Image: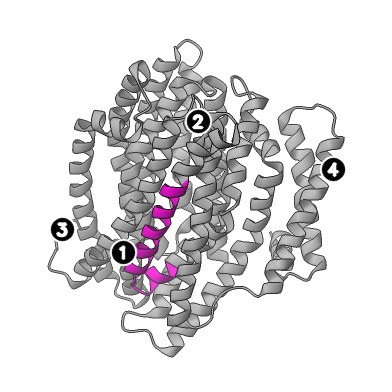
Amino acid sequence: MNRAVLVAAGILISRIAGFIRARVFAYYFGLSDSADAFNAAYRIPNFLQNLFGEGALSASFIPVYASLVSRGKREEADRVAGAVFALLAVTTSVLVLVGVLATPVLIAVIAPGFTGEKRELAISLTRILFPGTGMLVLSAWCLGILNSHHRFTLSYAAPVMVNAAMISTMVYFGGGSSLSQLAEYLAWGAVVGSALQFGVQLPVVFAVAPDLRLSFDTASEHVRTIARNFVPAFISRGVVQLSAYIDSLLASLLPTGAVTGLTNASLLYTLPVSLFGVAVAASELPAMAGAAGAASLDAAGAEAVRQRLDAGLRRIAFFVVPSSVAFLALGDVVAGAVLQTGRFTAGDADYVWAILAGSSVGLVASTLGRLYSSTCYALRDTRTPLRFALVRVTITIVLGYLFAIPLPHLLGIGARWGAAGLTLSAGLAGWVEMFLLRRVLRGRIGSTGMPTMYVVSLWAAALTGAAVGWGVKLALPPVHPILQGAAVLLPYGATYFGVALALRVPEAKATIRRALRR
């Protein structure tokens, strides 16, 4: 459990910096055309980071590297890591170059609704951002090594460097620049921050992997195993990223503010996914890989993996269920507390709330799905998550178009509200993917999941907390959004914990004990 706490601590530090960055961005940009252009541009090169980095690379590299480390083969593990870095650096450099040259085509595909100055600004920003993204991909290699040596906090806190550089850029240049100029300065700030994020991890990487040497060792069986597992993991991440880009494409067809509203909502609803889903999945992946072993899975290994999986599911659900209810019932309070400042108004917070409400439908499923996928990766199975990711993306694309474009017209509401349909469609698809992953794993490691009464207890506690939060919200006079957030969300959280304790939810007692110890 301490490993998950370390990952969560690193992610929390990074996310706090991310929220500060989002608030500063909202202050200067609001929901303007320049904001849409920057957010669209920021998504495009980050495709490489998500595609090569924390998803595909972790899924293929960590199980092999961590297994070698756990068996005491440190020198061999370091040789494998050096070969992977060399191959990754060359591949990423080529893709960054191609991306810079092909940016106009990418913008035409990803954001066809952008025209004129908005389109030209997005092209310029994307070209600036691409090289920095190459640094972020290499940072994911550092993450794989550090996680395998149980050095979790630094690798997940390192993105603070990017956020700090971007915040400093906006504060320094924000007063005397036009929005388009400020967007270009901000892109350069992101590149500098990406280099810092990579650089700050290197000293610790060399400390835990002293025998690390760069080489193009494609003859190593371990390197070949990583390469074989990388391909389906790469495709799996690719189809998930395709879904995100389809959302961005459809949002670009909606009125101004849809792209930025979707980005702001994503920042909020991915917090519980990262803090709890990614934290548990990332900390459990090396441990599950070690328990599963390098050979075929035996009964003892299957039982060890199943026990770790079930415990992780309970920990994730304990925190993500109240997050989902909060976004659905109190999303305006959450969005206002984090983002409402400067050009970002109360009406903008309500718009983000609608998008958050759509995402809350599948938040639990998407987060639990992270751990199910990591379990497959620990078992050296990267193809099963790929198959089900394809199913998820297909459903998301079909429903996303229907919910975002024709449905608002049929309901007689403004076209901009179609952005909420995008997150709703992704949520429904997330449930399908989760159930498919669980069914496969039950066939391999035995019955897995959470007891029905445990799930009922969590939802009962969260809904009771939401009722208390709504009562406080209605009774409050007009106050600053941050004060409103504290006044509403703190009673909500306290009520959730209180009811969970009364219903004898083990994770509630364990969480309080850990907090008191610290």
Lateral position of residue 110 relative to residue 167, left or right: left
Query: Quadrant of the rendered structure where residue 496 is?
Result: bottom right
Residue type at numbered disc 4: Gly
Secondary structure category for the residue under label 2: helix
**196 and 238: which is toward the camera:** 238
- Residue 109 horizontal/vertical position (percent): 30, 35
Q: Residue at x 25, y 28 (%)?
A: 104
**Comparing labels 3 and 4, the label whose residue is closer to the camera:** 4
Residue type at numbered disc 2: Ala
Q: Residue at x 39, y 42 (%)?
A: 246
Q: Residue furthest top?
A: 176
Q: Is residue 487 above or below residue 165?
A: below
Q: Residue at x 60, y 50 (%)?
A: 360
Where does the C terminus fall, quadrant-wise? bottom right
Crowding at dot 2, Cα within 10 Å, few <14 / some 14-19 / many 20+, comes out as: many
Residue type at numbered disc 1: Ser
Lateral position of residue 418 relative to residue 115, left or right: right
Where does label 4 land, which residue? 471
Where does label 2 land, which residue? 258
Q: Earlier in the sequence, mark 1 or mark 2?
A: 1
Range drawn in magenta? 374-399
